[in-house]
Image (cartoon, grey):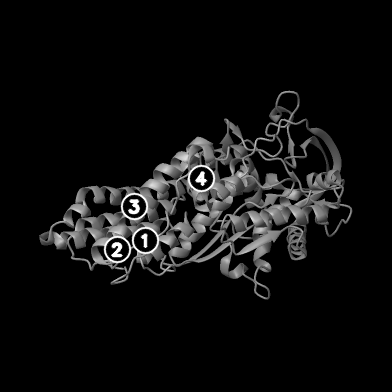
Amino acid sequence: MPGRFFITTPIYYVNADPHVGHAYTTIMADVIARHHRQRGDEVFFLTGTDEHGAKIARAAEDAGRTPKDHADELSGRFREMGRVLGASNDFFIRTTDEQHKAVVQELIVRMHEKGDIYKGSYGGWYCTSCEAFYNEGDLAEGRTCPTHRREVEWIEEENWFFRLSAYRDRLLAHYDAVPAFVRPKSRMNEARSMVEMGLDDLSMSRAQVEWGVTVPWDPAHTVYVWVDALFNYYTALTYADPGTDLVDRLWPPTLQLMAKDILKFHAVIWPSLLMSADLPLPERLFVHGYVLKGGERLSKTTGNIVDPFPYIERYGLDALRYYLCREIRFGDDGTFTDEGFHQRYTTELANDFGNLLSRTTKMIERYRDGVVPADPGGDADLANEALAAREQVLAHFDRDDVTGAVEAAWAWVRRLNRLVEEREPWTLAKDDARAGELDQALFSLANGLRIAAILLWPVIPQSCEAVFSALGEPVDGVLLAGAAWDAGTPGARVTPPEPLFPRIEVDEVTA
């Protein structure tokens, strides 16, 4: 039954330009959001940028501009990235929004009045790139950050603290009550281990960082950037639709996506903050792996990045979306390579899908004057296979398994290609006595392609809408209810399209 579906990406830190790692999370969220719109759910898709903290202030200073000017420019680039990627987000939040800052202050006042925030002194090894403290034993060789391999600095100051330790037992109880709170299971086990080992209280303010949300009862302090950022998922609903408070209708989030490096912030600190603020917890978190290049994680800090835009310019947006969904199993690390990208594009998108559409529409144009024949009713088994493909796609999405859903849809595409070879419409067309068989073959191919386009629309929407047009089907006919054998348009007239995925020679590939 249709319901509500509130999905979020982490908000991206505006210390440098977007790379394919950011694109990956945004695309995965968009694919899932589009799928749930196909189901008829009320979907709210949130993304945005995290713009406070010492790292932003330093980056702005190095660039010779104010932190706000710096944040405006970089946030604009992330917003543009979403537009180029075809992201269908309903709102783009910025932590420099005045409405966001006001609600953050309201929430921490609530926590302070509850007794969960107190003043104390703290000293620790701090990584500015992570905006996080590390214990001595967690540091890498040479007293460096284990993630960025940069030297950490000792910071000691009087701050306001959140009683994170007080929520240990409640967190463990929640993990027990909701076993799928964190997916995959291995990440839930990591979160549980962090909590069972004991929790230190969280330094949730900074006295030496001016670029942030002011602590209302102590203006000499600003809110720790992670506390500020995490609350964005809630604050956005209070002003995303001007004049309407969406909290009652949409809170809590249904699904929150993030990479594994911020597991602790989301699976341990975030639910504790919500418990303190007396707010319901998210239904589930999904923690994906890293996009790797040369075996190493993509990182702006180390310079190991992949710019997604040249791939979009060369191959098209849908090719990038498909490759990331198909090549990198959702939840695991995966390597981005030029060779792998080109191979997926050529063998699967161009050959399996694009060529199938071209052959099908040309045969219908040649043998049936461009009109899809009525269903003679002789492919009941194939109709059942189509239904099974749809149910498999649904089942994979129910498990947040985007890669599995694409594999299930692609198995149906390959089944249609086998159908061409099995039926050989060009042979049937030579025998008038077999006209009924030809009608069945052409109907089943066109109808099967229509169903494939519905199943794949969340991943490659532009291409699937081109398939609908070529088959004479309404472009807005993407609801999953339409992925039924008898749901096509009677007497649809095909229009053989330009190549859906034009062939690209290897020497043309952008390295």
Task: Indicate which label's residue lies in the foreground, 2 or 3.
Answer: 2
**What's the residue at 18%, 52% (across, down)?**
427
Q: From the image, which quarter does the C terminus lie in?
A: top right
Horizontal side, residue 316 vs residue 415: left or right: right
Task: Indicate which label's residue lies in the foreground, 4 or 2.
Answer: 2
Q: Is residue 409 visible?
A: no
Q: From the image, which quarter does the N terminus lie in?
A: bottom left
Q: Secondary structure at mark 4?
A: helix
Residue placed under numbered mark 3 in the picture: 356
Q: Secondary structure at mark 3?
A: helix
Q: Secondary structure at mark 2?
A: helix
In the rendered image, the vertical position of residue 458 relative to residue 401, given as above or below: below
Please tell me which of labels 4 and 2 falls first in the chain: 4
Residue placed under numbered mark 2 in the picture: 365
Choose between 247 and 145: the one closer to the eye: 145
Q: CA distance from mark 3 to mark 1?
A: 11 Å
Please tell me which of labels 3 and 1 falls first in the chain: 3
Horizontal side, residue 207 vs residue 416: left or right: right
Label 3: few (<14), some or many (≥20) within 10 Å?
Answer: many
Residue placed under numbered mark 1 in the picture: 496
Label 4: few (<14), some or many (≥20) within 10 Å?
Answer: many
Q: CA distance from mark 4 to mark 1?
A: 28 Å
Q: CA distance from mark 4 to mark 2?
A: 35 Å
Q: Secondary structure at mark 1?
A: loop
Q: Amino acid at mark 4?
A: Leu
Q: Amino acid at mark 3?
A: Leu
Please tell me which of labels 2 and 3 falls first in the chain: 3
Task: Indicate which label's residue lies in the foreground, 3 or 1.
Answer: 1
Q: Is residue 441 visible?
A: yes
Q: CA distance from mark 1 to mark 2?
A: 8 Å
State the mark number for residue 324.
4
